[in-house]
Image (tube, grey):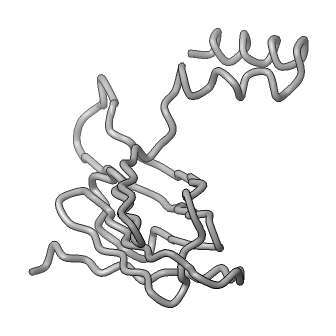
Amino acid sequence: MNQFDDWKKNLDRFFGNDFWGDFEGLVKPPLPQMNLYQYDNELLCMFSIPGLNDMNKVDVFVDHAVLEIKGIVEVNQKGGQQVKGEIMQGAFERKIDLPYPVRSDKIQASYKHGLLIIQLHRLISDTSNKNRIRITNLEDD
């Protein structure tokens, strides 16, 4: 993996820092993975975040027509050495441009079975306000 990082740094130096950004999604998919569903006046965002035990380790922000999530996933398996790792872990951050502005006063976020589900509603006015959204853990139900 160090050879790949060196190769990437050399390309960045030669072509500029923005060069690699065009290809990064092809080599490394954005994490966490998500699905976005659009309805008439509603958006449903589903993020795959397995192993999330503490809802305070994830922040969800909505600002007009941008959804931002960031946090930390810790997968702690004691007593062994990881031989292969494909499950997302560690810090993550992702911003998603939404197809239309959403209301900051009518947002619901919940987590169940490894999915963070965020329900957003279309904004009729044209104001911008970034708010942290509380996540309800449905695992305890």
The vertical placement of 137 against 10, above or below, is below
Residue drawn at (69%, 25%) of the image: 22
> If the image is split into quadrants, where does the C terminus sit?
bottom left
The vertical placement of 131 against 95, above or below, is below
Q: Quadrant of residue 134?
A: bottom left
Out of 21 and 64, give the one closest to the viewer: 64
Q: Position of residue 136 (x, y in %)?
A: 30, 81
Q: Position of residue 117 (x, y in %)?
A: 32, 65
Q: Position of residue 3 (x, y in %)?
A: 64, 9
Q: Quadrant of residue 54?
A: bottom left
Q: Is residue 63 left or right of residue 55?
A: right
> If the image is split into quadrants, where does the N terminus sit?
top right
Out of 113 and 106, give the one closest to the viewer: 106
Q: Residue furthest bottom?
A: 105
Residue drawn at (40%, 55%) of the image: 73
Q: Position of residue 92 (x, y in %)?
A: 53, 51
The vertical placement of 54 against 19, above or below, is below
Residue drawn at (38%, 69%) of the image: 118
Q: Is residue 103 left or right of residue 53?
A: right
The vertical placement of 101 against 91, above or below, is below
Residue drawn at (56%, 28%) of the image: 25
Q: Is residue 9 left or right of residue 23?
A: right
